[in-house]
Image: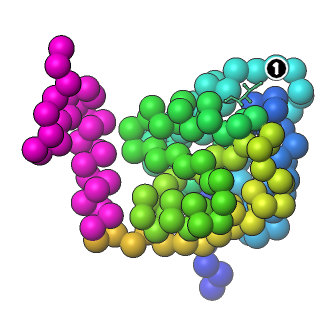
Amino acid sequence: MTKERPIVVLASDHAGIGMRKKLRDELLAGGYEVLDLGPETADPVDYPDYAEAVAGPVSRGDARFGVLVCGTGIGMSIAANRFPGVRAALLYDEFAARHARRHNDANVAVFGSRTMRPDAAAHRLKVFLAEPFEGGRHAVRLEKIRRMENRPGQYVPKGAAGCPS
Ligand code: RB5
């Protein structure tokens, strides 16, 4: 019996099309089930629309992992992290790719087409998808983030003073 690979949903903005296609092809070659949400043409688009297209299914549990590409990876990261349960990480090197999974249980990998080489991005994605979450003390920290999602703007860590109003 072959081991079932998780569904990976991908999107980019116009700046990330080339890198997204490379990542998609590498995923398909690796046996992943891939849902590529575009865009297909280089006409300028707004990255939040594509971040939502990927972060939505990940947030709802319809996709196990997401991949997003924009020029820097920063806009996609900001937008995707607005969705409950989404932990989007900008994978700026291999160590970050490994630890985004091990320590942060990241479920969306983000890349910058103007700041990274395509081969390096493809390698980091491979590392990211293969790495397990360690749990334990890291799960306790993620639970604190989950609580922030339920009480936006109200979370004050124990022992820390709130900002003066
Ligand atoms: C598009 O020019 C660029 O702003 C976008 O790809 C991204 O880098 C935003 O964070």
Vertical order, 41 against 116 (above or below): above
The image shows residue 34 at horizontal and vertical percentages of 71, 54
For residue 11, say whether it is visible: no
Residue plotted at (34% across, 69% down): 135
Residues in magenta, as a range: 137-165
Is the residue indicated by label 1 positioned so its CB lies within 8 Å of ligand 1?
yes
The image shows residue 165 at horizontal and vertical percentages of 18, 14
Residue underneath mark 1:
44
The image shows residue 89 at horizontal and vertical percentages of 55, 49
Vertical order, 43 against 76 (above or below): above
Verify whether residue 154 appears in magenta.
yes
List the single residue furthest toward the left: 159
From the viewer's perspective, tell me whether residue 118 is left or right of residue 161. Answer: right
List the single residue furthest toward the top: 165
Task: Indicate which quadrant contains ligand 1.
Answer: top right
From the viewer's perspective, tell me whether residue 72 is left or right of residue 29. Answer: left
Locate residue 150: give its quadrant.
top left
Vertical order, 104 against 38 (above or below): below
Instruction: State the quadrant of the N terminus.
Output: bottom right
Locate residue 2: give its quadrant.
bottom right
Q: Secondary structure at mark 1?
A: loop
Question: How many numbered badges does the structure rendering display?
Answer: 1
List the single residue furthest toward the bottom: 1
For residue 77, say whether it is visible: yes
Amino acid type at image mark 1:
Pro
The image shows residue 45 at horizontal and vertical percentages of 76, 21
From the viewer's perspective, tell me whether residue 78 is left or right of residue 47. Answer: left
